[in-house]
Every structure is written in structure tokens, then in C-alpha cells.
Image (spheres, helix red, strand yellow):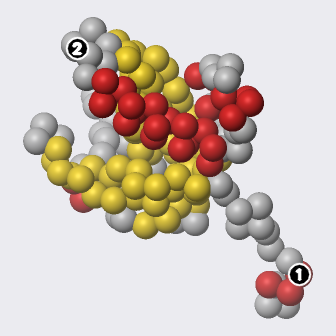
Amino acid sequence: MLNLSKVTTQSDVIPPGKYTATVTGATLIDTKSGGKMIKTELTIIGPVQAGKKIWELFNTENSNPKATEIGLSQLKTLCVALGYTNDQLQKFEIEMLLNKSVSIETKIESDTGFGEKARVKKYSPVKTDQFTTTTEDVPF
């Protein structure tokens, strides 16, 4: 018996928007061309689409220097949005990404092999009061 309840279909693509997500996975993987990249898993925690996941790849070593430059720049953007300083990033470890939250803005991209999928367009720090509720917000 197969459990298909958690399988994503094209109709399940996360719509473009702004979300808060937590980095729930980060691993260094080898590329087909002999390079290296960091594969991250972001799990949305709100305000909608909670539990949905987005995967992003960051080239860290590539035979094409431009691909490496772009990947490292995108990775640093994520790290800064997570709150890390340049001093802290001098000793970057993949584990530093885990269990940290970030605001993301998503877009839809078409992938030849996978169809439409959500991609992160922008990373920014989480506003500390984003999920804060005061007694003034309660209607009773």
C-alpha cells in the first residue's frame, strides 16, 4: 500500500507570496559535474501554507566561476537574513543554517523535469513582532 497524502502535485505549488520559514535541512552534496552545493530545506511556518516545503540549492564549488559566485552570494544573503554578521561568517558551518527562521518571498518557476515549483525570490530577517498577539487583538 502507498501513502500518497504527502506527495506534492502541480496543484499543490506554493503560490507566490511572503512567508516565514524555518531552515529544517541543510546538507553539502556533490554535483554531477564534480562540484559541490548546499541543499537546503525550508519549511513554511506561516502566516499561511504552514508545513509546505521549499528546497533551494547554493553552488559552493563549480567549474564555472560565475555559478560559484552567484551561489555564494545567495548563500550569504540567506545567512545575513538569518542574523549572522560578517565576523560570524568567517567560520561558516552548514549547521549554522539549521533551525533558524527567515522571511521569504517566493515566485513560481517552470522546470523542464518537474513542472512548476516555488522558488525563493528574496530572503529577509523575520520581524520579531510578526506573530505577537496582544490583548488588544483579542475580541473579548
In the rendered structure, the answer to whether residue 27 lies left or right of residue 138 reads: left
Residue drawn at the location 33% of the way across and 35% of the way down: 3
Vertical order, 76 against 65 (above or below): below
Residue 89 percent across, percent down from the top left: 66, 29
The residue positioned farthest toward the right in the image shown: 135
Q: Which residue is mark 1?
A: 135
Residue drawn at the location 60% of the way across and 39% of the way down: 79
The residue positioned farthest toward the left in the image shown: 112
Closer to the observer: label 1 or label 2? 2
Q: Amino acid at mark 1?
A: Thr
Residue 97 percent across, percent down from the top left: 61, 32
Residue 46 percent across, percent down from the top left: 58, 60
Residue drawn at the location 86% of the way across and 77% of the way down: 134
- Which residue is at the front of the view, 125 or 139? 125
- Which residue is at the front of the view, 68 or 54? 68
Vertical order, 98 against 13 (above or below): above
In the rendered structure, the answer to whether residue 49 lies left or right of residue 107 reads: right
Q: Which residue is mark 2?
A: 32
- Res. 113 in view: yes
The residue positioned farthest toward the bottom in the image shown: 140
> Mark 1: few, some, or many residues within 10 Å (few <14, many ≥20)?
few
Quarter containing the C terminus: bottom right
Quarter containing the N terminus: top left
Please, what secondary structure does the residue beneath circle 1 have?
A: helix
Q: Amino acid at mark 2?
A: Lys
In the rendered structure, the answer to whether residue 51 lies left or right of residue 130 reads: left
> Mark 2: few, some, or many residues within 10 Å (few <14, many ≥20)?
few
- N-terminal of the pair, mark 1 or mark 2, is 2
